[in-house]
Image: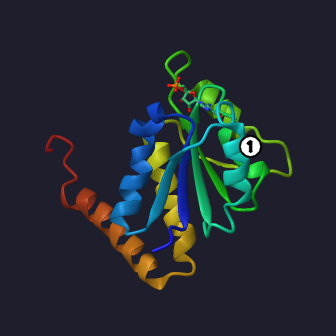
Amino acid sequence: MQPKVAIIMGSKSDWDTMKLATEILDELQVPHHVEVVSAHRTPDKLFSFSSGAVDAGYQVIIAGAGGAAHLPGMVASKTRLPVLGVPVQSKALNGMDSLLSIVQMPKGIAVGTLAIGSAGAFNAGLMAAQMLANTDAELAHRLEAFRKAQTDTILENPDPREV
Ligand SMILES: Nc1c(C(=O)O)ncn1[C@@H]1O[C@H](COP(=O)(O)O)[C@@H](O)[C@H]1O
């Protein structure tokens, strides 16, 4: 099936973080494409990927990058598709550099910025699924089941001393 979600990242070193987005999409049975694309290191590829993303059939793009994380904003500048930005936790500045590079977009070009690190990557995958569920009743059903299971797990064992 043609993937509707593209997950791109600035480097293979981002995979440990970005794989969380793939895990929730796998769980929700949402096909997705994964690829390294860097605004800094592969600028021509960034342009061709972003400008061809609609024709490629994608509906949402998740872009993760660390440090001077210009990737999500640059992708957003070349496509009308919604871009979810994941700030990868950097070693030098703990991801604060990544977050600030992604979140403070100029008015007129939007990036939806998630939390720093793995939780942000997971939630980016979840949010992409939630977007697609607006026009996919079966996916909406799987999302409801995911949320119910999450809630039930907490309600069934609320004692913090028990694992
Ligand atoms: N921020 C960007 C971009 C970009 O924004 O285009 N390309 C790579 N990077 C980031 O550089 C960090 C270090 O990369 P290496 O580990 O390959 O040196 C990664 O977190 C990557 O996302």
Q: Is residue 150 left or right of residue 116?
A: left
User: Is residue 13 visible to the viewer in this orientation of the structure?
Assistant: yes
Residue located beneath label 1 in the image: 74
Q: Is residue 162 left or right of residue 55?
A: left
Q: How many marks?
A: 1
What's the amino acid at mark 1? Met
Picture coordinates of residue 31, whole percent (x, y): 44, 66
Residue displayed at 57% across by 68% down = 131
Picture coordinates of residue 161, whole percent (x, y): 16, 40
Label 1 Cα crowd, 10 Å radius (few <14 / some 14-19 / many 20+)? many
| Screen quadrant of the N terminus | bottom left
Asked which secondary structure carries label 1, the reply is: helix
| Ligand 1 position by quadrant | top right
| Screen quadrant of the C terminus | top left
Above/below status of 142 relative to 98: below
Q: Nearer the viewer, residue 42 or 163?
A: 42
Above/below status of 19 relative to 137: above
Q: Nearer the viewer, residue 11 or 155?
A: 11
User: Is residue 110 visible to the viewer in this orientation of the structure?
Assistant: no
Q: Nearer the viewer, residue 71 or 157?
A: 71
Dividing the picture into quadrants, the one containing residue 143 is bottom left
Above/below status of 44 relative to 130: above
Residue displayed at 18% across by 55% down = 157
Picture coordinates of residue 126, whole percent (x, y): 47, 59
Residue displayed at 71% across by 48% down = 75
Residue lying farthest bottom? 137
Mark 1 within 8 Å of ligand 1, using the beta carbon? yes
Picture coordinates of residue 127, whole percent (x, y): 53, 60
